[in-house]
Amino acid sequence: MAISFPSLKGAPSTRYYFECEQILYRDFFPALAGKLLLKTDLWNEAKNTEILGWAAEQGAHPVGFDIALDLVRQATVAFGNHRFAFLNSDVRHLPFATDAFDLLYSMGTIEHFPEYKLAAAELFRVLKPDGTAIIGVPNKLDPFLRPLLVYVLSLFRLYPYGMEKSFTPRELQQLLESVGFRVTTRTGILFMPGWLRMADLWCHCRVPWLTAITGPLVKIFAALYRRFPALRSHGYLTACVAVKPAAGACE
């Protein structure tokens, strides 16, 4: 299972992932200082980019949760004495008050549940009016055909992340709008072949010197992502930036 993965921190593709997340935050969460920020899982904190740590350095007050208690524990250990609020919870039934958070970040979470619409509705509920959310899921239109790769691996029980539904950018927008969000931007992260990400992580964990091969390949896609913003919406995670309209706001 994914919970038992070794740390992916430091892999070339993880550094690229972190850069993608930083760009998202800078573009759409430009004023983090003093904001209460909710993140929907702790995989990145336990195993991957540690984006909440970076957000805290910008002045945000992060809250993160995960359905897997082991990941909550691993994230807590990874962040040591930092005073982050990490808890065990289910995105479909959040233990937070309505209108609680200024900002919300969910990347690769709601697609793991058949009740993804319920999860989206819960995210809408806990966000403050006029608050901003970035919500991402696997991109069904990924030009490198990652959903097909996931399907084939799943047939042979080689995909460790469990159920995973992919969405087109339009389908994600329609889902979010159906629960009340107003989508302002469609974007995405990780413009790169899924097989390259998987190969780079395998090399990082098993044969580190082979990242001398995968690393330069990852850097090509990172440079393209930086230089040509139009490519971002073709990443293997599609994302929508959405706001929760204030009560009585005009459509």
Image: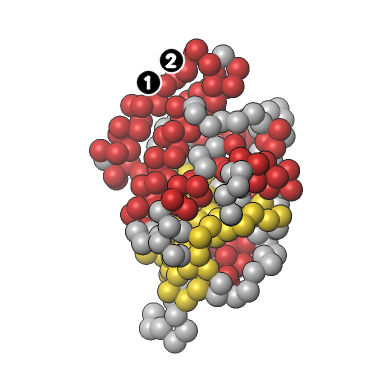
Measured Cα–Cα span from mark 2 to mark 1: 7 Å
Q: At 36% across and 47% down in the image, what residue appears?
A: 23
Name the one closer to the observer, 93 or 36.
36
Identify the amino acid type marked 1. Pro
**How crowded is the residue under tag 1: few (<14 C-alpha within 10 Å), some, or many (20+)?**
few
SS at mark 2 in the image: helix
Residue 189 percent location from the top left of the image = 42, 43
Q: Nearer the viewer, residue 136 or 151?
A: 136
The reply to whether residue 243 is visible in this rendering is yes
Question: Could you tell me which quadrant the N terminus lies in?
Answer: top right
Taking the view exactly as shown, the residue that stands out farthest to the front is: 81
The amino acid on which the numbered mark 2 sits, given as a three-letter code, is Ala
Percent coordinates x, y for residue 15 in the rendering: 44, 33
The answer to whether one can see residue 143 in this image is no
Rendered image quadrant of residue 75 = top right
Left or right placement of residue 22 versus residue 76 in this view: left
Q: Mark 2 points at which residue?
A: 212
User: Are the two marked residues, 2 and 1, in contact with CB atoms closer than 8 angstroms?
Assistant: yes
Residue 199: % across, % down: 53, 22
Front-most of residues 191 and 125: 125
Q: Name the residue under label 1.
A: 216
Residue 201, image quadrant = top right
Left or right: 140 as drawn, with respect to 98: left
Residue at the image position 49 percent from the left and 29 percent from the top: 10
Q: Is residue 133 above or below residue 197?
A: below
Residue extending farthest bottom: 248
The local secondary structure at tag 1 comes to: helix
x%, y% of residue 197?
50, 29
* Residue depicted at x 60% and y 47%: 81
Residue, x 56% and y 72% (percent of image)?
100
